[in-house]
Image (tube, helix red, strand yellow):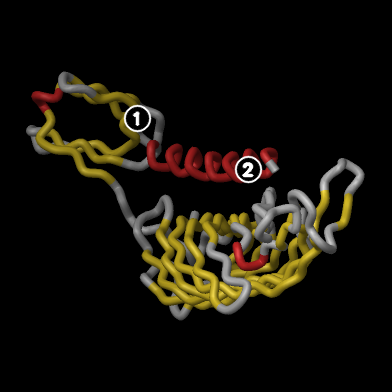
Amino acid sequence: MKRLYVILCMVALLAITSLAAEKAARKSTIHLRSGEFVTGVITARDNQMVEIVTDDQMKYIYDMNDVDYITHDVKKKNYDTAKFRGFIDLGYSLGVGEPRNNYWLIETSFGYQVTPLWYVGAGVALHHFKANVGSYPLRNDKTVPEPNDPDWKYPFIPFYLNGRYNLRSESQHTPWVDLKVGATFINHTGFFTSPSIGYHFATNQFFTINVGVGYALQTATYKLWCLGDTPGAISDDRGGSYVKKGGTFHNLFVKIGVEF
């Protein structure tokens, strides 16, 4: 489990590092008091001087007293020609129906923009469920029977295929609809699907922001670990015992994320 957390953190770190590198290399224009100007990548700057490298690799150093002002290129990304997509979303989900479980979520997706409107990809998510108290099996080794406090060790980790349709090109602000379909194989087993809708904000050429709401369905077979004398508990080879459970979880969620 710790390994999966590390992998997801590394993916997020690589994405952020890539965005930072792109941002650091953005074009700037230095406008001099003489009326001249030069465009390139600023490689050094302080209160006394500024250094800029042009596209033909010419380096210029100017005294800040000679600089009138500096402008920066923050044009929007051309999503019609940039085909690779990566999504990282964070959110919170409220359980509906029974069993009712709320959870924090991290969802990723990586794929290809087939057309300006259609995206297809695949991803993995981390849904940090907490077992519902009402589902705990009772212990009989107490004067008054009381629920167990099982150790819910593992979150749901669904793997899925992902499709998204934008109402307009992503070079503009646009609403979108999204569908994920897959399954959970690690720690718990079951089917997973999640339709959602949201809005894409075309912010700049480095990354964009997405916000969305949606519904998630997760079927699962899982174990609730038991303490003391619990009727129906199954012993395992490590000396513990558990009650095998199965259920369908229904959740409504809100999330926000970056797209690059």
Residue at 52% across, 77% down? 177
Q: Which badge, 1 or 2, is on the more N-terminal residue?
A: 2
Q: Nearest the camera: 126 or 73?
A: 126
Residue at 36% across, 55% down? 204
Mark number, residue 10: none
Q: Quadrant of residue 39?
A: top left
What amino acid is at disc 1? Val
Q: Which residue is mark 1?
A: 53
Q: Position of residue 108 (x, y in %)?
A: 59, 56
Residue at 64% across, 74% down? 217
What amino acid is at disc 2? Tyr
Q: Quadrant of residue 173?
A: bottom left
Q: Position of residue 240 (x, y in %)?
A: 82, 46
Identify the element where label 1 is drawn.
Answer: strand
On the picture, is 244 further left or further right than 174?
Answer: right
Residue at 48% across, 62% down? 92
Identify the element where label 2 is drawn.
Answer: helix
Q: Is residue 117 visible?
A: no
- Numbered circles on residues, count: 2
Q: Nearest the camera: 130 or 139?
A: 139
Q: Nearest the camera: 238 or 21?
A: 238
Q: Which residue is mark 2?
A: 5
On the picture, is 81 further left or further right than 227?
Answer: left
**On screen, residue 87 above or below 199:** above
